[in-house]
Image (cartoon, rainbow, N blue to C red):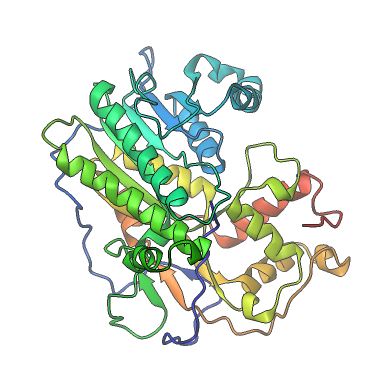
Amino acid sequence: MAFAMLSFTSRFAVSSTPKTWCIRPSTSSERPRRVFLSRNMAILSSPQPGSTPPKVLVTGANGYIAMWIVRLLLEKGYAVRGAVRSEEKVAALTDAFGKVHSEWSDRLEWAVVPDITKDGAFDESVKGVEAIVHTAAPLDTTTDDPDEYIKPSVNGTLSLLTSALKHGSGVKRVAITSSCTAAVTFKTPQAEPGPLPFRETGWAEEAIETVKKDGAKTPDSIKYRAAKTLAERAAFDFVEKNKDKLSWDISTLLPSVVIGPNLGAPKSPEVLNASLNRFYRSLFTNEPEEFLKSTICSVDVRDVAQAHLSSLVKEAAGGQRFLVSGHATTWQRIRDVAYDINHVWYSDEILPRGNPDLPRDIVYFFDNNKSRDVLGIEYESLEKTVGDTMADFEGRGWVEKKVSL
């Protein structure tokens, strides 16, 4: 899928801001709102010594975010069934988890689901699990047809939920990975001066309308935004329609640009997922100043994993959307953080410095109050996230030499 980085102009009211926003506005009194009534559902139970650990299904288990979710679940004592598209991916994950952490092998199993959009694709996978984390996304499309973005996203989500309804008798909660871009709307008037806030109450209606109007001519980023919005909405509609039959409810997680160390084994920056690839290119390639002074909202991948787990175990998370975003800053500020971590990267001209004197005005941000208050997320500092990501790049040999993209 296309990487959906927001690009806003200065038509919004922007005032001088700190270097980095750790997004927790002190004036907000908005209470968490339910999207539908969660009927006091039971939540994922905690692992107990001497007892069979609760099992969680994680779809798209070979993905960047999903691997951290799998790792966190195993660290906390849960059993995991990871769903992937091929036996080849099973082998890679077995290397990544089973061989490195042999103590986890008896709590880790894999299911191959070649086509997540197919009816009944997850019928077997949902059996015997207490919770589901749905991170799987359709494969990249090579066509301009917006239906090739939207239908697989919607149908993949509905396929999973239908399987859970029919065969997931033990399921208590389903957490679904959406995107912060599904909450981007300009229909709500901005009540306060300064950066434009996006909150869980917003839905990306404009993206859907643009796709309907422009069809194949719609930019890929807008198609992606529409697909994420429609898939998430379809999930809530499914639950509302079937609420009298369900023993489970859902939570959706909407992360911003996800960065941090990678548990996978990418052989080059070119094969990184979209967010990490954009982060890498923003540091390693010369970029125009318009880009460098633009806003970037990011979150540590480990915080995203924790948000997914918290959404499974906290009753108040049922029926809720959660924006998961740690910081709002500029791309130049990220370069400045990297510079502070290691001047040698710049003195040896491994990384382009950019312009430290550029304005650091923040144009928009994703309000993370709800994820803090309900899920209890304490976000990593930008310095730690950037430092750990760069250390990961160094460990792969990508910092000591120029890597063409």
Image coordinates for residue 338, horizontal then vertical, percent: 70, 64
- Left or right of 156, for residue 289: right
225 or 174, nearer to the observer = 225
Relative height, residue 43 to residue 168 (above, below): below
Q: Residue at x 72, y 62 (%)?
A: 341
Q: Residue furthest left?
A: 244
Relative to the observer, which residue lies in front, 208 or 191?
208
| Location of residue 106 with respect to 228 vertically, above or below | above
Q: Where the C terminus falls, by quadrant? A: bottom right
Visible residue check, residue 377:
no
Q: Give the camera-side residue of 319 and 217.
A: 217
In the rendering, at what x and y percent does residue 278 appear?
64, 59
Residue positioned 24% across, 21% down in the render: 169
At horizontal 48% and vertical 18% (from top left) the residue drawn is: 107
x%, y% of residue 357? 68, 85
Is residue 255 shown left or right of residue 171? right
Residue 232 spot, x, y in % from top left: 33, 49
Quarter holding residue 188? bottom left
Decide if residue 58 is in sight here: yes
